[in-house]
């Protein structure tokens, strides 16, 4: 009998660390884990996919909760996650637009379960950025992703994280997404729910208030947008302006309307818009055409789009 009692006590001692370890997660409560996940998603605009990602985030951002009342619970929770990381799994699934689940499991135990509305961070910003650069909406997720990779060098860190998360989310659910570009409009849907709708955009309805159209745009031979230096843009605009001043001074018949012009190696300089009344037989236009063509070949651009007033000097 005595031997049996000693055996039971010994087993309890051996099992005690395991019991404490399991209870530590209970003491920390799901609130601490939720707080960690909230911090991660606020920082990266998406949910984590592993314990390692959580640990790294927490190590780099300890000041986020070091003064909080339950900071100790968070540390305990992180310790629990690290000790059991080989058996902890992360799941994220999309049932419909309003039902995206996020689950963290340890063996058969659910450590965290959330259902949130599916969120595509920074998608509107990226689409407007694409439209500003190409004067049209993107035709696919791939086109938007390529544009984002091109402009990444100019993005601030937080916006970069937001765009990265948005592109990853689009690519993750690409088989559920309908990308519909009809004429000058764009509609993106997931199942039967609307992710976003961007209305009719007609860049040829230009006015002096369309400041973003005043910036020239440069492209490679395959029509891929090129990021250029501010100095190059200023020089191009200065040369175009001085050419206009030259002819405007010689003959005061400059047209106050703005025109969008496009140069390609195949077609040369021409109007970007249909039914434009710009006169291409003028001396001003021929000199402008020669300048833009030279500029394009010097800098290896396949296409240039810019705006200018019209000068009717013959």
Image (cartoon, rainbow, N blue to C red):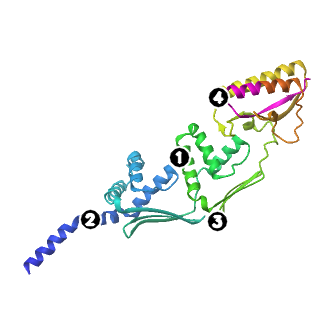
The kind of secondary structure element at disc 2 is: helix
Q: Which residue is mark 3?
A: 191
The kind of secondary structure element at disc 1 is: helix
Q: Which mark is residue 161?
A: 1
Sooner in the amino-acid sequence: mark 3 or mark 1: 1
Check if mark 1's residue and mark 4's residue have beta carbons within 8 Å.
no
- Local packing at callout 1 (Cα closer than 10 Å; few below 14, some 14-19, many 20+) is some
Instruction: Give the residues in magenta.
Output: 291-314
Q: Which residue is mark 2?
A: 20
Residue 277 pos. (x, y %): 90, 36
Along the viewing direction, whichever of 37 and 300 lies nearer the viewer: 300
- Local packing at callout 3 (Cα closer than 10 Å; few below 14, some 14-19, many 20+) is some
Work out which quarter of the rendered image holds the C terminus and state it: top right
Along the viewing direction, whichever of 224 and 14 lies nearer the viewer: 224
Sooner in the amino-acid sequence: mark 1 or mark 2: 2
Sooner in the amino-acid sequence: mark 4 or mark 2: 2
Q: CA distance from mark 1 to mark 2?
A: 38 Å
């Amino acid at each position: 009998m005595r031997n049996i009692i000693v055996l039971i006590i010994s087993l309890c001692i051996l099992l005690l660390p395991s019991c404490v370890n399991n209870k530590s997660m209970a003491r920390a409560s799901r609130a601490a884990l939720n707080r960690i996940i909230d911090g991660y998603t606020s920082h990266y605009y998406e949910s984590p996919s592993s314990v390692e990602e959580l640990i790294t985030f927490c190590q780099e951002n300890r000041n986020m909760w070091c003064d909080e009342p339950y900071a100790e619970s968070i540390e305990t929770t992180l310790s629990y996650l690290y000790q059991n990381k080989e058996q902890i799994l992360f799941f994220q699934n999309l049932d419909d637009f309003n039902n995206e689940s996020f689950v963290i499991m340890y063996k058969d135990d659910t450590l965290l379960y959330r259902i949130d509305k599916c969120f595509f961070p920074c998608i509107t910003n990226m689409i407007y950025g694409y439209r500003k650069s190409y004067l049209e909406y993107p035709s696919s997720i791939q086109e938007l992703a390529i544009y984002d990779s091109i402009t990444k060098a100019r993005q601030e860190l937080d916006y970069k994280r937001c765009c990265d998360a948005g592109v990853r989310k689009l690519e993750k659910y690409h088989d559920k997404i309908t990308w519909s570009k009809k004429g000058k409009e764009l509609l993106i849907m997931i199942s039967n729910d609307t992710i976003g709708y961007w209305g009719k955009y007609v860049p040829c309805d230009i006015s002096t208030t369309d400041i973003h159209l005043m910036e020239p745009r440069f492209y490679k031979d395959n029509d891929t947008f090129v990021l250029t230096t501010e100095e190059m843009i200023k020089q191009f605009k200065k040369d175009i302006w001085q050419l206009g001043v030259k002819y405007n001074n010689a003959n005061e018949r400059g047209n106050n309307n703005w025109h969008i012009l496009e140069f390609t190696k195949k077609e040369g300089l021409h109007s970007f818009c249909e039914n434009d009344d710009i006169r291409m037989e003028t001396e001003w236009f021929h000199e402008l055409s020669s300048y833009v063509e030279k500029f394009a070949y010097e800098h290896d651009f396949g296409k240039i789009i810019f705006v200018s007033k019209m000068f009717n000097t013959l």
